[in-house]
Image (tube, rainbow, N blue to C red):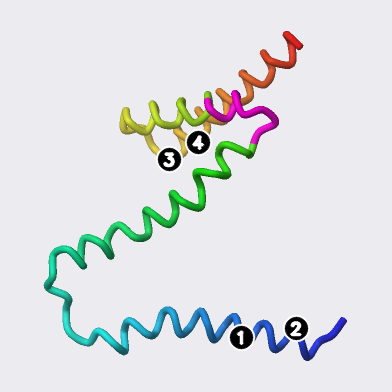
Amino acid sequence: MNYPRILICIFLMALVTYVIRMLPLAVFRKKIHNRFIRSFLAYVPYAVLAAMTFPEILYSTGNPYSAVFGLAAALVLAYRDKGLLTVALGSTAVVFVVEQVMNFFS
């Protein structure tokens, strides 16, 4: 292993992470009053999380059909204001059942 290179990589990753978090605090000293910018910044974490999660939902199972059924179950449970654990367990159960049914008929 090349320990100096590993340490340099860790240092650079820490520096980039620190700069991304520190820069807004240093640049924007006053409170942001613009409604558009405030609403944009409020929804950025949700948009990033959705963009990272959604493709993985469709490719995380052995069959895309079971993934679609699991996604549909999660959307229905979330729409009915169920908790995060209920949505996760319910959609996982639906994927499991669909996978078992598909294995039974193939």
Residue at x 34%, y 60% (from the top left corner): 44
Real-space CA distance between mark 4 and mark 3, rounded to the nearest whole angstrom = 6 Å
Nearer-the-camera pick, 84 or 104: 104
Amino acid at the residue labelled 3: Leu
Q: In the drawing, what numbered circle is on residue 88? A: 4
Q: Residue at x 55, y 23 (%)?
A: 94
Magenta-highlighted residues:
61-68
Up-down relation of residue 31 to residue 58 (above or below): below
- Please state which of the two labelled residues, at mark 2 or mark 3, is closer to the viewer: 2
Please state, as top left, top right, bottom left or bottom right, where the N terminus lies in the image: bottom right
Query: Compared with residue 102, is residue 74 higher up or lower down, i.e. above or below?
Result: below
Q: Secondary structure at mark 4?
A: helix
| 99 left or right of 15 in image | right
Q: Label 1: few (<14), some or many (≥20) within 10 Å?
A: few
Image location of residue 6, percent across then percent down: 75, 83
Say whether disc 1 or disc 4 marks the residue closer to the N-terminus: 1
**Cα distance, mark 4 to mark 2?**
37 Å
Image quarter in which the C terminus is found: top right
Q: Earlier in the sequence, mark 2 or mark 1?
A: 2
Mark 2 vs mark 1, CA separation in Å:
10 Å
Instruction: State if disc 3 and disc 4 touch (CB < 8 Å).
Output: yes
Q: Quadrant of residue 10?
A: bottom right
Disc 4 versus disc 2: nearer the observer: 2
Q: Position of residue 97 (x, y in %)?
A: 62, 19
Q: CA distance from mark 2 to mark 3?
A: 38 Å
Identify the residue under disc 1: 12
The tag earlier along the polypeptide, 3 or 1, is 1
